[in-house]
Structures are given as C-alpha cells and as structure tokens.
Amino acid sequence: MEHWPDDSARIAHRIVTDLQPESVLDAGSGLGTVVEKLRALDVDAGELDPSGSLNDALERKYDLVLCIDVLERVPAPEAEQVIDNLCAASDRILFSSSPSEYAEPTNVNVQPPEVWSAHFARQGFVRKLDFDASFVGPWAALYERSHTLLPDVVRT
C-alpha cells in the first residue's frame, strides 16, 4: 500500500493519539515517512529495512510494532517465524495484509484475515476488536498480547 506524505502525518498522529507508544518499530513496511513523523512527535521510532531479514530475532522490545503490507511478501514457510519475532519484540502489533492482492507478483502469501489472526493467536495475541485501525488501511488490525484464558477470550 502506497502512502502519501500527508497520509504519513495522519497515520503517525493517530498512532500517537490512540496508542500512545514511547517506542515504535516499522518492521519492513517501508513507511519511512511515518517513522519520520513519529520522531517529530517525540516517539522513539525506528525501521527495519525491507531488505533486512525479518527471520532474525529483533534486538530490543518496542511499545508497538508496525507490520503493514509485509507478510504477504514473505513465503508461507517463513511467515510463522517472522510473526514469532514480531511478537517477541512487542506486546502490540499494528498489522495489515491484503486478503485479495493476488495479481501483485511479489505477493507470495496472500491470506484472509482469519489466517493471520490464527498465527498471532498461537503467540498469545488477540485482535483488539474495539480498536478501529482503518486509518492505516482497510484490513488493518491491532493485535495485543493476552494473558486471558481462551474461553474468556471467546466469550468476550
């Protein structure tokens, strides 16, 4: 998903206003202008170069990890390791992946949202259903680490 500079300011503002992170990692999303805007808002923001390996463990913890339109470009056998690494680096992940962009040649792992939710659930993360992440994109969702027992999660 391509973001324009004013989109970057809007996204950064919403992240700061709604989620109030002190530190953010853009995990290969290529949203460098969002990172710049977050820094301008006094957030410790960094980015993992899209050419860098998401298969390697991240060096530190962050209040929030952005993973926007990345995992559909990661081969399915590697996606679980990438999610493991992202989940180890934060308790909150702002995530988006188009469930229908099969025509894009670099998209080798297009999945419906429930498949990604299952991957995150294996790491103890659940989708925060009362958070509207559409300011990032139509398929965006916030996943948070949950220590709630599964029956209580389902009931909620």
Image: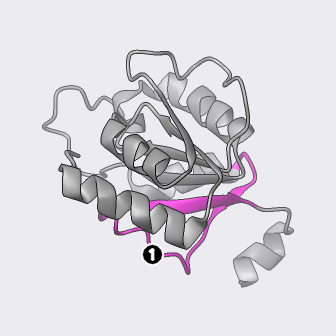
Rate crowding at label 1 as few (under 14), some (14 to 19) or many (20 or more) other CA atoms within 10 Å: few
Q: Which image quarter is the C terminus in?
A: bottom right
Residue 79 image offset from top left, x and y in percent: 52, 30
Q: Secondary structure at mark 1?
A: loop
Count of residue discs? 1
Residue 6 image offset from top left, x and y in percent: 21, 58
Q: Nearer the viewer, residue 138 or 11?
A: 11
Q: Residue at x 52, y 63 (%)?
A: 16
Callout 1 amino acid: Asp
Q: Main secondary structure of the magenta part?
A: loop
- The answer to whether one can see residue 32 in this image is yes
Q: In this image, 91 relative to 113: left or right?
A: right
Q: Residue furthest left?
A: 103
Q: Residue at x 20, y 40 (%)?
A: 102
Q: What colour scheme has been applied to the protein in the rendered image?
A: one colour
Residue 17 among those drawn in magenta = no
- The answer to whether one can see residue 139 in this image is no
Q: Which residue is mark 1?
A: 132
Q: Is residue 138 above or below residue 64?
A: below
Residue 108 image offset from top left, x and y in percent: 31, 29
Residue 35 image offset from top left, x and y in percent: 42, 42
Quadrant location of residue 113? bottom left
Q: Nearer the viewer, residue 83 or 103?
A: 83
Q: Residue at x 42, y 36 (%)?
A: 71
Q: Residue at x 53, y 23 (%)?
A: 54
Residue 124 among those drawn in magenta = yes
Q: Which residues are magenta?
A: 122-145
